[in-house]
Amino acid sequence: MNDDGYQHQLAVLRMEHRDLDHAIEILQAQPVVDQLQIARMKKKKLILKDHIRRLEDQLIPDIIA
């Protein structure tokens, strides 16, 4: 995959991460909170964050000192 493909994929993953964050905030503000659903969303958010970091690592070249 080329850099443009990685950049596009990163943008999509970051948007999904932000959307999950927003959805979690909305759910937590509800009078009756579904803790299991929130936990699942937080887990998915962490998985997305790890995937984002891996893609960022592939875009940044290693510098050998």
Image (cartoon, rainbow, N blue to C red):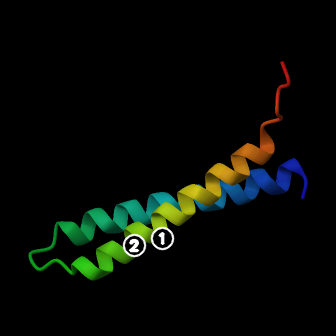
Location of the C terminus (image quadrant): top right
In screen coordinates, is 17 left or right of 22?
Answer: right
| Residue at (64% x, 61% y) in the render | 12
Location of the N terminus (image quadrant): bottom right
Dot 2 amino acid type: Met
Please count the marks in the image.
2
Single out the residue that lies furthest toward the left. Answer: 31
**Residue 31 location, x and y as percent?**
9, 75
| Residue at (36% x, 61% y) in the render | 22
Q: 39 or 21: which is nearer to us?
A: 39
In screen coordinates, is 60 left or right of 22?
Answer: right
Dot 1 amino acid type: Lys
Q: Which residue is mark 2?
A: 41
**Residue 56 location, x and y as percent?**
70, 46
Q: CA distance from mark 2 to mark 1?
A: 5 Å
Q: Is residue 31 above or below residue 62?
A: below
User: Could you say which disc has been placed on residue 21 in the image?
Assistant: none
In screen coordinates, is 47 left or right of 1?
Answer: left
Q: Quadrant of residue 57?
A: top right
> For the residue labelled by badge 1, is the local secondary structure a helix, a strand or a loop?
helix
Q: Residues within 10 Å of mark 1 (few under 14, many from 20)?
A: some
**Residue 38 location, x and y as percent?**
30, 74
In screen coordinates, is 42 left or right of 12?
Answer: left
Q: Quadrant of residue 14?
A: bottom right
Q: Residues within 10 Å of mark 2 (few under 14, many from 20)?
A: some
Q: Which residue is mark 1?
A: 44
**Residue 27 location, x and y as percent?**
24, 72
| Residue at (54% x, 56% y) in the render | 49
Single out the residue that lies furthest toward the front. Answer: 65
Q: Is residue 40 above or below residue 52?
A: below
Q: Are marks 2 and 1 in contact (CB under 8 Å)?
A: yes
